[in-house]
Amino acid sequence: MFTDQDYQEYFEQIASLERLMVYHVFDLLQEVEDPQILQQLKTIGSDEKKHYALIVRVFNTILFKSDLERRKFIREHVLGWVKVRHVADGSITEGYCVDLSAQGVCIEFEDDKQDLKGDIEVWIETFEDGKLYHHMGRVAWTTRHAANQRIGAIRFKIGVSFAE
Amino acid sequence: MISREALLHQLKENRDKEDKALPLYAQHLSNAMFLSSALEADQHKIKEILQTLSEDSQRHRQMYQAMIDRIEREGKDVY
């Protein structure tokens, strides 16, 4: 028998893998100049964004409607690049934006970032339209996904609350 | 611009990710208990979505392989 948690874990695995595919395609699009390969990658990138949007729809409108209703702020599942400056030591690290709201952002990394705590400065550039965001914030939570690691997907996330 | 080696490496990784995704999409589709607690219309919608993801993944895999084959055939150093 499948529980709500089983469904959540299963679709989160798929969502995590789809996001990773989006990230890797958009990373390549920044570097490739060959027109034929660029076109192929743009087609794949567009499909991967649609796939992710479909999975988000499964979560939000079909499976877990009540969770969405309980959320204080509407979150946009906006994917993009993120640069994070750790205020304590000035170190810079790069990750990806999972979702964004007026209150904060969820960022994921391909490596462990256990030492990323406290106050941070965040720059976000969206894949969709290159919109830029800049915020000061504080790391509110961190999580590591062992299941995602097994399928080679993204495995470390942080939640950031914006200061302003 | 990106070097031939770096591009090949990333294309192969992306192709391999598509391979990993395929069994994940199909994992529960033949299980009658999967989504049995959801409304029939929702069950149908979700299974359709998983089917779309699976078909697109196979197509992407072929596209990645075609790019890899082309780059390996050519003598270019950068792309």
Image (cartoon, coloured by chain):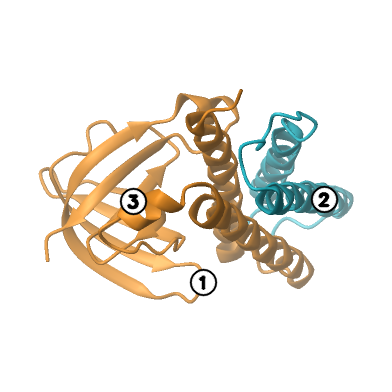
Q: Is residue B45 left or right of residue A107?
A: right
In the visual, does A11 lie left or right of B65? left
Residue, x 70% and y 48% (percent of image)? B40
- Say few, some or many: other residues with alpha carbon within 10 Å of mark 2 (under 14 / 14 to 19 / 20 or more): few
Instruction: Determine whether, in the image, residue A128 is placed left or right of residue A116.
Output: right
Q: Which residue is mark 1?
A: A128
Same-chain status of marks 1 and 2: no
Residue at disc 3, secondary structure: strand
Q: Could you tell me if residue A95 is visible in this image?
A: no
Q: Residue at x 60, y 48 (%)?
A: A18
Q: Secondary structure at mark 1?
A: loop
Q: Which residue is mark 3?
A: A106
Q: Nearer the viewer, residue B77 or A112?
A: A112
Query: Which chain's residue wears label 2?
Result: B
Q: Is residue A35 above or below residue A117?
A: below
| Mark 3 or mark 1, earlier in chain | 3
Chain A display color: orange
Q: Quadrant of residue A39?
A: bottom right
| Quadrant into which the N terminus of chain B falls | bottom right
Task: Work out whether residue A151 can be spotted.
Answer: yes
Between A20 and A73, the residue placed more toward the observer is A73
In space, the residues marked 1 and 2 are separated at their CA atoms by 24 Å
Tag in front: 1 or 2: 2
Q: CA distance from mark 3 to mark 1?
A: 17 Å
